[in-house]
Image (tube, coloured by chain):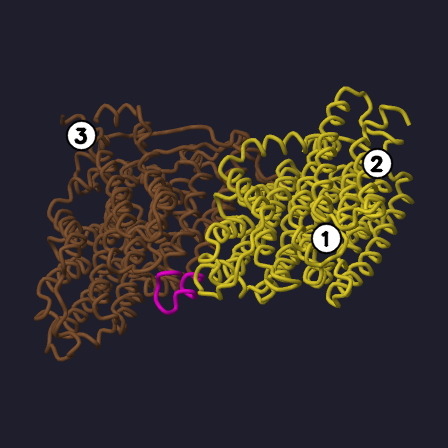
Amino acid sequence: MTWSDTVFLLPEIILTLGASALLFVPLIGERGAGRSAKWWTLVILGITAASVIVSSNAVVGMTQTATFAAMFALDSFAIFFKLLFLFAIAMVVLMSEDFLRESRYSPWEYYSLLAFALCGMMFMVSGVHLISIYVGLELMSLSSYILAGYYKNEQKSTEAAMKYFILGAVSSAILLYGISLIYGVCGSLNLADIDRAMSTMITNDALMVGIMLLGAGLCFKIAAVPFHVWTPDVYEGAPTPITAFLSTASKAAAFSIFARIFYSGLHHFQLDWSSVLATVSALSMIVGNLAAITQNNLKRMLAYSSIAHAGYALLGIISLNAMGIRGVLLYTLVYVLANLGIWAVILMLRRHEYAGEQVDDFDGLYRRAPFWAFAMVVFLLSLGGIPPTAGFIGKYFLFAAAVQSGFGWLAIIAVLMSAVSMFYYLRIVVAMYLKEGAAAEVSASGSLRFVAAVCLAATLFLGVLPRPLIDQVTYSSRRLLVRALQADGGR
Amino acid sequence: MGFLYQNLSIPILTLVTFVPLIGALWIIFFIRKDNEQSIKRTALFFAIADFVISVPLWIYFDVNGKGDRLFQFREVVDWIPSLGVKYSFGIDGISLLLILLTTLTGVIAIYSSFAAITFRQKEYYALLLMLQTGMIGTFCALDFFLFYVFWEVMLVPMYFVIGIWGGPRRLYAAIKFFLYTLSGSVLMLLSILALYFFNDGGIPFLNIGGLNAGLSFDVLRYHEIGHLIPPNLQFWIFLGFFFGFAIKVPMFPFHTWLPDAHVEAPTAGSVILAAVLLKMGTYGFVRFALPILPDATQQAVPWIVFLSIVGIIYGALVSLVQKDMKKLVAYSSVSHLGFVMLGMFALNPMGLRGSILQMINHGISTGALFLLVGIVYERRHTRLISEYGGLAKQMPMYATLFLIAALSSMGLPALNGFIGEFTILLGVANRSMVWAAFASIGIVLGAAYLLWLYQRVFWGPLDNPANQSLPDVNRRELLTLVPLMILMVWIGIAPKIFFDTIEQPVDYLVRKVDPHYFDRKPLMHPGAPAAAHPEVAEIHQ
């Protein structure tokens, strides 16, 4: 392993060392000092973020674009997502403080697991080889299973972790089986080689089965219908900060590899897989949004809403064009921002364990915490795609991509379902502004205020002045796209 | 002042659009919640300031401007260059009149709320001002993206106004309003996208070639290339626009949100809804559907005319049986907007002119009626017609004002409604006598439900004890109504200046929809013959 190899992997190396160090701190007698755990974690995340920047600058000058037998690339696409994951995890860390203080579990292990999950995500988004993607995915998933069951003594939490683990393991197996079939047909697991092999192939049953199984495994990770049944239970049972993690960072990571595999590996067979994914996307939007309407538990409602959002994001992958890939990047970002903000506001209402999670708990919030109620409205509008919030820009790209690629029927379902989604988002607004509620305290700690304020500012800013972000995603998605389009005869 | 407006050394439309928003932010950030006097004064100040800034728009507007000068006070700045989105403002005569109506309605809505709104005033006035920014922006925008943003932005404040300060079923009404309108507008977004890709690279999957003219949301650009769009694509795009606009108008059978929203909304909300928000739909047809999709428009004529006539008669019949005054006025809107749509889809200068004037008229008359209903509601807290009777004895001034508004709404000559409806009927009759015959049934029914309402509320014995001590209109209420009364008489007696203002835009529209119209029918340009034919006018001068 030479320096040029190391520099590709520098952020992950630093993060792994940091995460391991966090695990060892309690052994040398720091068990009581929970507060410093948060700051140490943030410092590690900060150093990692700095090293991502440093490595990306160092990599620009190199001739090789990937390292470790072309398994690991540090391209602009990966950098965009790595920074996004770092941001999301940092926000989750900030949100977790109160929960950890109450639950009396060791914060060090918790933060360490979050950092390992992050490491997995950062590793897999850099993967240009199905095995490295799989390894990253598993690291993320294993950490998430543990985190979902962090309320060791709560039945709901344990049940959530169990469900998540069993279904997750099955889906990983399906994913692996798909990968093995693709390997059997293409003779390689490197995305570029798969791409090259497929360019000379005609439709092939084994390959089709392989792609379908791979897609099914990925659909489980992004919680698309019909692989979504775990989502509401896990989101409900997991500790709220972990739900925030699962619905933002973890989901963004799954989108990122979904986009990478399908844009740079499998685009030759778009005609074959796009119709299947289009059905999945339509079902996710319909089932997710309709099921969310009837939920009274906010965590379940947001779980169904996240299923619907997986359906929207799939539009960007199905369409396989410049609008689509930019849409995936943009949408992931605005979705993460809005969702983190919502979870921060929910956590402000949370008193202990599961309280503060019913829609009714929001009754009259405008009176108790006018600013945070307003912030909540902005986040919900952003999820609903109403301008001038960032959500509109994201949805705009995805709908445009669908129209441009000829999936008009899918676009019609998408826009109508996004109108339906406003129905249940407005339920929360109704509760906050149009109902009078109990005078329960809102305990907005400094960290939660910070998270909500950052997300609010970003959501509004990117909604009104999206220009810098659009330029950034255009740049970040360019390499992925160039390859997809070149091989496709410049369509 | 004149220098400033003409030479655009200040972005006047931006100013008109965003002054209310500044007011809203000012109220939110600088005034304490319990300082109600100050909140009201500030809101009224910003509304009046906005009106005062908007009036000179008309003074310095060149009514003879055509071609490049049709859209005036242009402001174009790049907003999102990578998508071709521009911050592009500009108005023609149609948007000018609607903007003036909006700024006037804004003042009236705020002033009329001073007594009616008793709680959460800070949010209320801030939301009304935000709503105004959304409405004016929609009328000013000449970029589809920008237009869509303003169009959607309007929804949220209106939702809150209905949902917080509305009547007993406010939640239901607010959500219905929001979802109905949103469903229509997202379909409209798809149509906008289809246009957008047609102008750029086309839609390869559907074998629709594009113009390769790059990414643009410029509305005027699409006015130019509209006739190049293949008819089948025009059909689908028109369908999307139709859903977006017809729900907003609202046309039968998409009108069911309207009575709920109107009945539950507070008075000022109803006034804004009737006077301005409904005009968004008709404005959308005039600005986008007609000039950009001429073939589809021509094809849609029978369908839209059918729905309009059904709307006219259905709305009137339903008004006739209402027990609630506000609901009666709400259904009368369905009928009146049927007229507007009918006149528009006569697709001749007369019909369009009447249609556009009738948009303004409806805003004035129905706005006044809602204000008047609100006045007795504030005193008695009921709107049931059966609760009233003989009010003319107790509230003579109120009875007079109500009579003027009702007569204006039913189209009595010398008041504004007559001019609008008559012009529409002329235009429609020019196209088909049968349509005009059906439409005139609506006029008769309109007189019936309004006069019957008047009779039941104002005449007969004053036998309900609760009504025997009602005070007549006070000074503030009078002040909100007088401007509308003046406009009713003004348009009724001297509509020329209004017709002159919309002369060129109508001419432009007819040429877009039917390029050979003026060749075929050289004599069919009633009203002001010289101005309708610019070439002739120039010779005469």
Query: As displayed, is residue B284 above or below residue B375?
Result: above
Q: Nearer the viewer, mark 2 or mark 1?
A: 1
The letter of the brown chain is: B
- Chain A rendering hue: yellow
Q: Nearer the viewer, residue B129 or A189?
A: B129
Q: Quadrant of the C terminus of chain A?
A: top right
Q: Residue at x 23, y 55 (%)?
A: B112
**Mark 2 on the same chain as mark 1:** yes
| Residue position for label 1 | A276
- The x and y percentages for residue A10 are 81, 31
- Residue B304 location in percent, x, y? 37, 55
Horizontal arrangement in the rendering, residue A69 relative to residue A109 (left or right) = right
Residue at the image position 44 percent from the left and 33 percent from the top: B218
Magenta highlight on residue B167: yes
Q: Is residue B335 above or below residue A107?
A: below
Query: From mark 3 to mark 2, how far is it between C-alphas?
Result: 70 Å
Measured from the top left, where is residue A382 in percent x and y?
A: 54, 48
Q: Badge 1 sits on which subunit? A: A
> How dense is the environment of label 2, judged by Cα within 10 Å: few (below 14), some, or many (20 and up)?
few
Q: Is residue B17 above or below residue B38?
A: above
Determine the secondary structure under disc 3. helix
Q: Are marks 3 and 1 on the same chain?
A: no
Going by the numbered disc 3, the residue's amino acid type is Ala
- The overriding secondary structure of the stretch rendered in magenta is helix
- Residue behind mark 2: A200
Which residue position holds label 3? B537
Q: Secondary structure at mark 1?
A: helix
- The magenta stretch is B164-176
Are labels 3 and 2 assigned to the same chain?
no
Give the residue type that dot 2 points to.
Answer: Thr
